[in-house]
Amino acid sequence: MTAADRTSQPLTMGRWQITPLRDAFGPFLDAATVFPMLDASELTRLLDRHGESYADPSRTRLNVASQGYLIRRPGRTIIVDTCVGGPKPDRQPPMPGFVSRWLDQLEQAGVTVAEVDTVVTTHLHHDHVGWNTTLTPDGRLRPTFPNARYLLGRTEHGYLTSPAARAMLDRVGDYLTDSVTPIAEAGQLDLVDGDHQIDEGITYRLAPGHTPGHRIVEVTDGGRTALLVGDLVHHPLQIERPEISTAMCVAPAEAAATRVGLLGRAARDRALVLASHLLHPVRVRVRTGGFDYDVEASVASYGP
Ligand SMILES: [Zn+2]
């Protein structure tokens, strides 16, 4: 974090303040694996265009953040996505030696775990639900936020609990068991259908494609809108070329259609776009075949 970051303010949408809470940032993803539909020269050209904030110098790795968001007003404390998370009994960290300091970022933002009243999940991939639970000294997993309701789309829960998802969980590690089931067993999980209003100005909306029940969080208040778009965008090349989905997208064509629609709406409404894996919020503008973007740099954020 730079000194400039420390002195900047959270994003303000009317009564609501939004603060990014970053768990990690680095060249974590192999670019060709994420975008297998692009040939090598096209991929390099696109990565060059978007610069070193989003790719390593060799242009073979994507620089990505693992990031959640804190949304606050007096009387409400909401978290969107709980990132990679801490130790789990039967699962290795996704990067060797990775130790999460995400709860420290929350503390630096002035929030205790007991104050959080709502935890919202954009989708059920491991790097969005990690701090849902905390490992206790006796080896159990308990909800990290003892007083929170954890909101999840019913479609998404059905997707990850289906027999078809079992093979994926066996391959990547069973984050359903260590990060979702303990929440349900504690009676803190609320499954929602359709678009769901969390509070005045905050709506949890279906935006499917990356996963079957992927959702975004829209914050609209005081004439301003922020769209927390989860994993609809992994790299800015998908803003320039929104038809390009990733290899991690369960339904790539549907993800592309959702992305085109949401970025179009963001351009029309001058909404800020906050993606889980992009370092900074952006504003987008329509251009032929896609969108341009400007980085909103002066935002308070916590994390590496
Ligand atoms: Zn993700």
Image: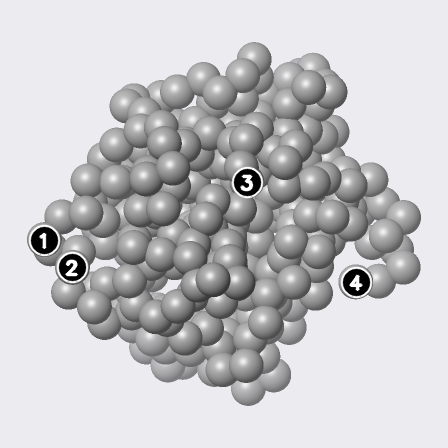
The residue to which callout 4 is attached is 1
Q: Please tell me which of labels 2 and 4 falls first in the chain.
A: 4
Q: Residues within 10 Å of mark 1 (few under 14, many from 20)?
A: few
Helix, strand or loop at disc 3? loop
Of tags 2 and 4, which is closer to the observer? Answer: 2
Q: Which is nearer the eye, 274 or 145?
A: 145
The residue to which callout 2 is attached is 166
User: Which residue lies most toward the front here?
Assistant: 138
User: At x 56% / y 13%, what residue is drawn?
Assistant: 200
**Mark 3 and mark 1: Cα distance apart in space:** 29 Å
Residue 217: where, in percent of width, then height?
48, 32
**Mark 2 and mark 4: Cα distance apart in space:** 38 Å
**Mark 2 and mark 1: Cα distance apart in space:** 5 Å
Task: Say the numbered circle drawn on residue 145.
Answer: 3
Give the amino acid type for the residue marked by disc 3 in the picture.
Answer: Phe
Q: Is label 2 in contact with label 1 (beta carbons under 8 Å)? A: yes
Q: Where the C terminus falls, by quadrant?
A: bottom right
Task: Say the numbered circle drawn on residue 163.
Answer: 1
Q: Residues within 10 Å of mark 4 (few under 14, many from 20)?
A: few
**Mark 1 and mark 4: Cα distance apart in space:** 42 Å
- Residue 60 in sight here: yes
- Residue 287 in sight here: no
Q: Which is nearer the eye, 171 or 295?
A: 171
Q: Where the N terminus falls, by quadrant?
A: bottom right
Of tags 3 and 4, which is closer to the observer? Answer: 3
**Mark 3 and mark 4: Cα distance apart in space:** 26 Å
Question: In the displayed structure, would residue 266 be above or below residue 73?
Answer: below
Q: Please tell me which of labels 3 and 4 falls first in the chain.
A: 4
